Image (spheres, grey):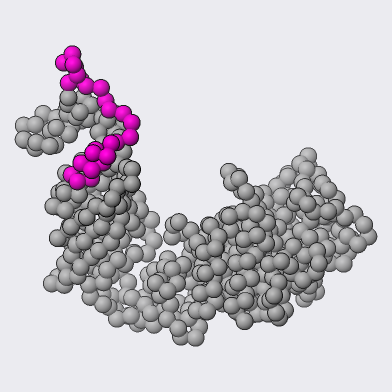
């Protein structure tokens, strides 16, 4: 029951008091009368307000820790501002997780936040191992009681716990795996942190197919049914060897590159096969945005739009595509990025508009016959395999969405805004299809392992692919190309496309970039903001450089 809730507890007060549960009786009465103290006139004392004092922070944490150490889940929960949520998790700490001998050592408080260290022992079926980790809590003022209380978050009990999660010790849900890269190098969470959620999922899905046997472990059982997170192994199982398509060297470069920019993700793959070479995320959570993100890709979408224009006979790379300052589509006016010089001369070609990322040139062209509201959708689905739900990569993925749209969204979709949703996996695949002409569904583990049927698509005409590849080359190498700065210094056959996507509620645009070097394609996005070359570009360039 959350603190300060007065209704529905009055009927239980007398039973608690008769039972003599000293603190429990005081705690409930305190919730009703604001602390049980009396004021100068004999009435209830005013409810305290304002931040808890240093003494209150110290006293509250000491009581909470003491009860937790003794395994008194209900008592410990009563010192929080949400005992109904706190008690089950604190109870599972001792009962389901079999954690005993708990010693909690608080660190120096920083205002109302107290860091602490937990040392304990996990014992199960005659096996025992020490457990140690760090966490922190915050003390707040109860809204109606005025008491100093621990602000309840599951992460108080363990930093990796989320809402609804529990701790359990027993036989592992899946046998362990020894995941290896394409050359046999072992891939671990410790060396490649971004692979943590990926390896957990691969273990859950393929542990029993890799020939391993489960061990005994302490794990987090997640409420969202995502794979268990192993925290401590009491008895090792026998790991099965699982071969992946990843490249340890490219993965290492991807991990390092995304760390430079907040909220960033990148994917690299092999266009000739669809094999994923690297996947990395830099986020505050475990969400695999590189595979599961659903956000506007900005002007990287112009790869698909250009393909649509060429395939439908509306334009060719050397055909006219004037770049005016503005373009109006069904009452909505679109502009170019600040600083982009208009060009309505005879030299204004589709290749030039693509390399310079001119929005208005593309908006002008989507009004041509025989294009309809569904033309971009058909191009994305039939040629590039972006149907949203049929890729079978080996782990969970979102496979892109380009819905048929009317009104202003038809124009917005063409430049990667509107209702279009993508992630770096999708855009790396788009680049791979664009430069080879063939759609090869990306994957992390061989489909033969579990008889998965990979998605298929028609792919591009050879002439369309040749034009797209050349336009991407010009974007990365010509004087006016928006990707020149990011791709500078890369050798081999290179090409790219930049993007800047506006997202509702964000002060700055997302940075997008997709590119290729020989037989490697990579795409990245970063919420750090700016143009494609500002954040996402350097990430992709670093990954492509490592691929050589």
Q: Is residue 118 left or right of residue 303?
A: left
Query: Which residue sits at x=46%, y=85%?
Result: 184
Q: Residue 123 in the image: x percent, y percent?
A: 16, 67
Query: Which residue sits at x=29%, y=36%?
Result: 52
Q: Quadrant of residue 47?
A: top left
Which residue occupies the foreground of this view, 329 or 268? 268
Q: Is residue 303 left or right of residue 129?
A: right
Is the magenta region chiefly helix, strand or loop?
loop
For the image, the number of numbered tags is 0
Q: Residue 75 in the image: x percent, y percent?
A: 16, 44
Q: Is residue 197 left or right of residue 55?
A: right
Q: Look at the picture and state if 435 lies above or below 37.
A: below
Q: Quadrant of the N terminus?
A: top left
Q: Look at the picture and state if 302 lies above or below 65.
A: below
Query: Which residue sits at x=31%, y=29%?
Result: 49
Q: Residue 454 in the image: x percent, y percent?
A: 55, 73
Residue 142 within the magenta-colored segment of the rendering: no
Question: Which residue is at the far bottom?
Answer: 183
Q: Quadrant of residue 238?
A: bottom left
- Which residues are drawn in magenta? 38-63
Q: Is residue 450 visible?
A: yes
Which residue occupies the foreground of this view, 287 or 378? 287
Which residue occupies the foreground of this view, 373 or 291? 291
Q: Residue 241 in the image: x percent, y percent?
A: 39, 82
């Amino acid at each position: 029951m959350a603190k300060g809730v007065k209704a529905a507890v009055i009927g239980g007060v007398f039973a608690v008091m008769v039972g003599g549960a000293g603190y429990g009786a005081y705690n409930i009465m305190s919730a009703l009368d604001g602390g049980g103290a009396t004021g100068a006139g004999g009435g209830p004392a005013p409810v305290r307000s304002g931040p808890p004092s240093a003494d209150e922070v110290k006293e509250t944490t000491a009581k909470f820790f003491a009860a937790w150490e003794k395994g008194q889940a209900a008592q410990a929960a009563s010192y929080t501002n949400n005992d109904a949520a706190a008690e089950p998790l604190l109870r599972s700490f001792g009962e389901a997780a079999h954690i005993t001998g708990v010693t909690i050592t608080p660190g120096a408080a920083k205002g109302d936040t107290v860091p602490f260290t937990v040392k304990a022992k996990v014992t199960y079926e005659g096996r025992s191992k020490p457990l140690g980790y760090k966490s922190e809590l915050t003390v707040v003022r109860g809204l109606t009681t005025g008491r100093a209380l621990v602000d309840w978050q599951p992460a108080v009990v363990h930093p990796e716990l989320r809402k609804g999660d529990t701790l359990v010790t027993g036989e592992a849900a899946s046998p362990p795996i020894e995941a290896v890269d394409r050359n046999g190098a072992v891939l671990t969470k410790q060396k490649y942190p971004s692979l943590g959620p990926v390896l957990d999922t691969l273990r859950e899905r393929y542990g029993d197919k890799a020939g391993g046997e489960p061990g005994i472990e302490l794990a987090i059982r997640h409420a969202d049914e995502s794979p268990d997170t192993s925290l401590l192994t009491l008895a090792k199982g026998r790991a099965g060897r699982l071969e992946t398509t990843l490249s340890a060297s490219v993965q290492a470069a991807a991990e390092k590159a995304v760390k430079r920019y907040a909220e960033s993700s990148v994917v690299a793959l092999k266009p000739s096969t669809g094999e994923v070479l690297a996947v990395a995320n830099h986020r505050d959570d475990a969400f695999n945005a590189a595979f599961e993100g659903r956000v506007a890709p900005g002007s990287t979408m112009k790869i698909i739009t250009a393909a649509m224009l060429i395939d439908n006979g509306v334009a060719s790379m050397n055909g006219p595509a004037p770049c005016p300052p503005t373009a109006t589509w069904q009452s909505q006016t679109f502009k170019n990025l600040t600083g982009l010089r208009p060009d309505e001369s005879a030299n204004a070609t589709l290749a030039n508009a693509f390399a310079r990322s001119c929005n208005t040139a593309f908006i002008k062209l989507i009004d041509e016959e025989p294009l309809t509201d569904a033309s971009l959708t058909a191009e994305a689905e039939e040629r590039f395999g972006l149907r949203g739900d049929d890729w079978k990569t080996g782990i969970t993925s979102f496979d892109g969405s380009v819905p048929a749209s009317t009104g202003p969204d038809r124009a917005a979709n063409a430049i990667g805004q509107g209702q279009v949703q993508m992630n770096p996996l999708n855009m790396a695949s788009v680049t791979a299809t664009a430069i080879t002409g063939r759609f090869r569904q990306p994957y992390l583990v061989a489909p033969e392992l579990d008889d998965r049927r990979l998605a298929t698509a028609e792919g591009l005409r050879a002439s369309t692919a040749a034009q797209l590849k050349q336009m991407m080359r010009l974007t990365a190498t010509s004087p006016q190309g928006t990707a020149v700065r990011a791709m500078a210094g890369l050798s081999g056959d290179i090409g790219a496309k930049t993007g800047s996507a506006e997202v509702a509620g964000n002060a700055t645009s997302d940075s997008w970039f997709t590119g290729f070097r020989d037989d490697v394609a990579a795409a990245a996005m970063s919420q750090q903001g700016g143009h494609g070359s500002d954040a996402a570009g350097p990430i992709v360039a670093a990954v492509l450089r490592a691929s050589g």
